Each structure stands twice: as C-alpha cells, then as structure tokens.
Image (cartoon, coloured by chain):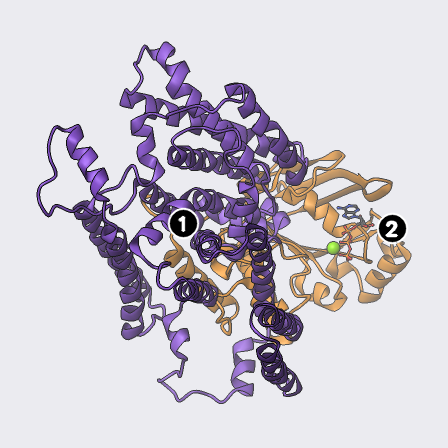
Amino acid sequence: MTDTSTEDAATRPAPPPGAPRRGFFQSLEIDVRLLGMIAAFVLIALAFNYSTGGRFLTPRNVFNLTIQTVSVAIMATGMVFVIVTRHIDLAVGALLATCSAVMAMMQTRWALELFDLSLGDPMLAWIAIAAGVVVGGVIGAFQGWLIGYLTIPAFIVTLGGLLIWRNVGWYLTNGQTIGPLNDTFQLFGGINGTLGVTWSWVVGLIAAALTLLILWNARRTKVAHGFPVKPMWAEAVVAGLIVVGILGLVAMLNAYEVPERVLERDFAARGLEVPEGYTAGYGLPYSVLLLIAVAIVMTVVAQRTRLGRYIFATGGNPDAAELSGINTRLLTVKVFAIMGVLVALAAVVASARLTNHTNDIGTLDELRVIAAAVIGGTALSGGIGTIYGAILGALIMQSLQSGMAMVGVDAPFQNIVVGAVLVNAVMIDIAYRTEAIRFLAGLVIVAEVTLILWAFYTPIWALLFLGIAGGALVLARMRRIV
Amino acid sequence: MATPLVDMRNISIAFGGVQAVDDVSLDLHAGEVVGLLGHNGAGKSTLIKCLSGAYRPDSGEIWIDGKKADIASPRDARHYNIETIYQTLALADNLDAPSNLFLGREITNAFGLVDDARMEAETRKIMSRLNPNFKKINEPVSALSGGQRQSVAIARAVYFNARILIMDEPTAALGVHESKMVADLIQELKAQGLGIFLISHDTREMMELCDRVAVMKNGQLVAAAKVEDVTEDDILSMIILGKKPDHLAA
Ligand SMILES: Nc1ncnc2c1ncn2[C@@H]1O[C@H](COP(=O)(O)OP(=O)(O)OP(=O)(O)O)[C@@H](O)[C@H]1O
Ligand SMILES: [Mg+2]
C-alpha cells in the first residue's frame, strides 16, 4: 500500500511546515465544475446583455427567465437520479402531458361531480394537484418496476412511454384544450402568483440566515471531530457570495414592477382606485419557491439520506451495491417514482403558466431535461451528478434560448446552437477529467470559434484567432501542458 | 468435537455448461483459519460466494452453528455475521472511503440522516490501525492505489464484528509491509475467536497463516488437511495434479 501522498511530496516542492500553501480556489473548496458553470452562465448573461443593449438583464427579463426555467429545472433534478443510476427517462415530456391532462380534467370536470364542488373553488386546485402527483408517481413506479424487476432497458421502457403517455393524455381530454384552469391552480404558473415585495424580502433573509447557519454548523461539526477546515476568510467569501446571490435575485424580482393597468384591474376588482403614486413589485413567484423547495429536498435526499447514498453507490458500481446488501431493483422503482412525482409538479407549473392544458404541452421536454442534467455535470456513465448542477444547466439552456430569441437569431439556428452547446459542455467536462483528450478538445473548440468568427464577423478576425489560439495550443502541446 | 461454525455440505453450482463447484463439503471452526488453494478458475471464489450470499448454490446445504442456514442474498449473510472481502473488492469507485466502509449500514443521526462526520471519524480510527499511511479519506476510492483500495475493503469486513470472515486474496495488491499487517490482523482476529476462510495463491503464506488448507481443482475438492500433516510440495502437487498425497489417503 504505497501511500500516494508521500509520492506527491517527493515530486513536488514541499510546502513550508505549518503553512500549507494553497491556491485561492483550492482554499475556497468550491467544486471546479460548479465554478465553471457559474462562469459560463455569467458569460452568457453578459454577452446577451451587451448584444441586446442592456435588455437581457432587466428585472422583467430575469423574472421571465426564472419562471420559464422552473418546469424543466424541477424535472432535471429527478433526471439526475435516473442518470446517476445508469438509466434514462425519455418519457418525461409525455408523462407531463398525461399528468397535466388528469389535473385539468379533475379541476374542470371530474372533481366537480365527485366532490360536488363549484368551478372556482380553491379546493379543486389541491385535489387536482394531488391526483396529478399520484398519477405521476404510480406511472413512474410502474416504469421503474419494468426496468428494475423485469430488466427491460430503461431506454426501451421510456421510449415506449414517450408514445404511450402523450396519447393517453390525448384520450383523457379527447384532444381538446382544457381551460381556463382554476384561479388557485394558476397561482403556480409564475406571474399570476407572486409573494410581493415584503414577503420576498422576508423569504430572502430567512434563506440567507439559514445558509449561514448551515455553513457554520458544518464547520462546527468538522472542528468537533478534529477534521481540517478551510480558513475563516474562505468561509466568509463563500458565505458572502451565496448571500449576495440570494438577496440579489430577490432584489431583481422585486424590482419588476406590476404594470399600471394590472394594478388598476386588481384594485377595481376590490372596488377601489389605485392611490396616487402607488407601485408594487412582483417579487418571488410561487413556482420559483416550489423549485427551491424541490431543490432543497432533492439535495438533502442526495447527500444526507441512505436512499441517496444507495443511488450513487449503485451508479458507481451496481455489483458492489448489490453485494453490500442494497436492493438495487427496488431502488430503481423508487428512482423512477420520484421522477414521476417531479414530472407531475412540473406539469402543475407548466399548465398553470399557460393557464390551460394543451395536447402538445411538454413536447420535447425530455430532451431539454436530459440536456440540463448533462450540461449540469451528470455523467451518463453513472455515479456522478449534482442537483444544483442540473438546475444551473436548465438555467443556462433557457438563457441561451431566450437570449437568442431577443437578439433575433433565426429559430432553426437557435436549435443548432443549443445542440452544439450540449455536445461541447460534455466534451469540456470529459476533457477536464481525462488528460488524454484535452489537446483534441482544445482543437475542436478553436475550430468552432474560428468558424463562428468567419461566418458572423470577418475572415480576418477568424484567421487572427486561429493563429493565436491554435498557436498557443500547439505550443502548450509541445511543452506537454495539454 | 465442537459443532463447526460453518458447515458447507455437498455444494454444487454450474454456470451454463461449466460446473464451477462440484459437490464440495468443507467446514470451519471458531478460532480457525482455513486456506483455500487451487489453480485459476478452480472454483474457490464461486464456493465462498455461495456462503456470502452472492450466489445461490444449485444444490447442497450450509449449516451455521449447527443450524441449517438460508442465505439467499448478501443481506442474509450479514445477518449471520458473515463478512466478505471480495477478490474484485466490490467498492463503489465514485464514493469515498467512509461511504464505502459503511455502505448498506450507514450511521444515521436522530433525524435519520446519514452522519458523514461520525462515519469519517470511525473510518479514520480503523484505518489508523490497518494502514497508518492512509490519508485520502475524502477522495473517491477511484483515486486510490490498488493496495489502498484493498485496505478499505479489509476495513469494511473487520469493522462490523464479523464472526465469519471470508478473505478472497486479501493481500494480492499489498506491499510486503502491508501484507505483514494483514497477517498480524488475521492472527488477532483468530485469537478473538473468528472463523476465517482465506484464499491465496501464496503457498508459503498459507502454511504460516492457516490451521488447515483445502485444495480445489476443476470445481472439486481434492483434499483438506491440517498444515502440520502436509509439506509445501504436497500442496503444490495437489494443486497441479489434483491428487491426494499417499500418506493422507491412508
Ligand atoms: N458469474 C459467472 N458466470 C459464468 N461463469 C463463471 C462465473 N463466475 C465464475 N465462473 C466460472 O466458474 C469457474 C470458477 O471460477 P472462480 O472465480 O470460482 O475461480 P477461482 O478459483 O476463484 O480462480 P482465481 O484463482 O482465478 O480467482 C471458472 O471456470 C469461471 O469461468
Ligand atoms: Mg477467485
């Protein structure tokens, strides 16, 4: 058992005793992949903001961006578990349509007769949501059972599901658009249900305080066990970044003001007139709160529960998991049941945002969800993935899509870009872990950028870039850096 | 004679056309180390996997403490306090040492959440006994050397108060010093009254560590004998020729 840390010490100059020299980012102990994703997101946001003359980072657009991301982001957190256990779920978009159809029918027809309620009763929304969640969970569990116990590959089961569930949804509604949906139900759609300025600040401050508490607690536990901890300043930087991030988002969403005519309508509904100089901000949408709740629960499941531990162990080595006494078949059922429940929640948000159920709701969502999880660092080979990564992945995808729409990029070209980003993200992720392909990956990126510059700016810039970046790459290769 | 801790009777198992284990009977007493030897593919790992719950034998019975045992899964084996170090180590490469050590038996806190800090502390404690050089507690085990991985697998088997320990080539990837530590560990566990099945290709090591040796060839048991009664040459000829030495046959 040669200890590699002594080997390292032999090949590297030893740090002075008592003062281990560590890099800035090393001290922060932030996942490099997370850092990369945040950097990519910031870069995309700034680039679009620049090319739209500042329209991308307005409160209004940030608000829209967040509510557009929620549905895919909720499903992406579940897709992390699915992919981590070496499976795939191609049926999420179709299942979303079935759940949406069940919920729409429940609140506009079935529940009215079943429970003798009248249209507009808030109870209808909750009954519909409960029904949707049960349907999603049961269908998910059934697919998981076919995969785990009957050992039919997930790809096949969910490919079948893709065809089946969309058309089950069609039959439930006879192919009709069902709506308008219940007012209470619509609160989950985004703009129709927000916390308002004051409560948004309250939630933001509570979230910030909780974050600090969790960080402090983690540090205390480590100290209690005598484990190494990062320096205090690093702790402060990380805490500061998170708090600024939370409060910044709240400030941005609060700054999006309710338009005057909407205010007039709301006041008129209560028989009042809008007071002189009165304004109101939207604040945090309920749908975003739902996403945050899902993210917290899923992160706790992933990191702090046995279920999560078994999911990752099974993804890393199914045989080892089995030999350790883990029932991997039942685990598959659970993973797909969780996915189904999350699809149902996503269906609430998606249909509430549209204010009615349509047949094509969720079409192609399976691809967006898988792409979000993968861009977020989930490895298709299993065992690796994070919840926050998947959510960031969903946000990056949505930013690209809406940013390009704002800039006025042609629709076909938007899809080309999203596809290219997906492949590139995975390539960069692999290159980060595998030294052997770094040079080739670098060449691909240089070639891509050259092509883009050539097509959209001038050949001169393209050639200049090719010369400089290509030269640097070849030089790095010769010096064996890549 | 006391009832054996483990009594495997007439175990047979086949994979497709290959009779991997063919009517093998072998027992193990408390405080005893039984060595299993044989050429590659002789059926050693397959035999002990029937005991550890990884495989179900086609026929044959396993008795533990004089009672017939029903071992249908690795979980059942754990209930009988059977711990196994597999030849393949059976580690989840993407998880760190504490997660692997406690896999399937995580320590949880009052809320039912896994208590990583306590598991890490326990791991540090046991690793400091098994392999004091072991420092990479928080890295995925894929980043460990073969020997370091092996010490994680050993730690996992000895941590949970096993009564029956199965070690399938536990020292295959270990250096001289670390092999010595495992040998000391085996002596210590044996003194505590554990029964140990040890598989190894190192005949000399087996002569030193074991009370009895059993030799397999082509799925069949050639012979089991006390180490005092055989020489290294006897064992080698049993492995290669599959023949019982004359003085044992008597
Ligand atoms: N899961 C399996 N499927 C099919 N055949 C198997 C399986 N496991 C073992 N075998 C076969 O059973 C026979 C015995 O294998 P086993 O692994 O028990 O040998 P071994 O004595 O442990 O060998 P080694 O010293 O190489 O570890 C071999 O012929 C092997 O090919
Ligand atoms: Mg073997």
The residue at 50%/61% (across/down) is B97
Residue type of the residue flagged with mark 2: Ala
Residue type of the residue flagged with mark 1: Thr
Quarter occupied by the N terminus of chain B: top right
User: Do dots 2 and 1 share one subunit?
Assistant: no
Task: Tell me: is circle 2 under 8 Å from ligand 1.
Answer: no
Q: Secondary structure at mark 2?
A: helix
Q: Is residue B247 left or right of residue A346?
A: right
Q: Any idea which chain is the purple one in this picture?
A: A
Which of A328/A349 is in front? A349
The image quarter containing residue B181 is bottom right
Q: Any idea which chain is the orange one in this picture?
A: B
The residue at 10%/32% (across/down) is A272
| Residue annotated with mark 2 | B249
Question: Where residue A133 sits: x, y (%)?
Answer: 43, 29
| Residue annotated with mark 1 | A299
Give neighbour class at mark 2: few <14, some 14-19, many 20+ (Cα, 10 Å). Answer: few
Q: Is residue A454 left or right of residue A256?
A: right
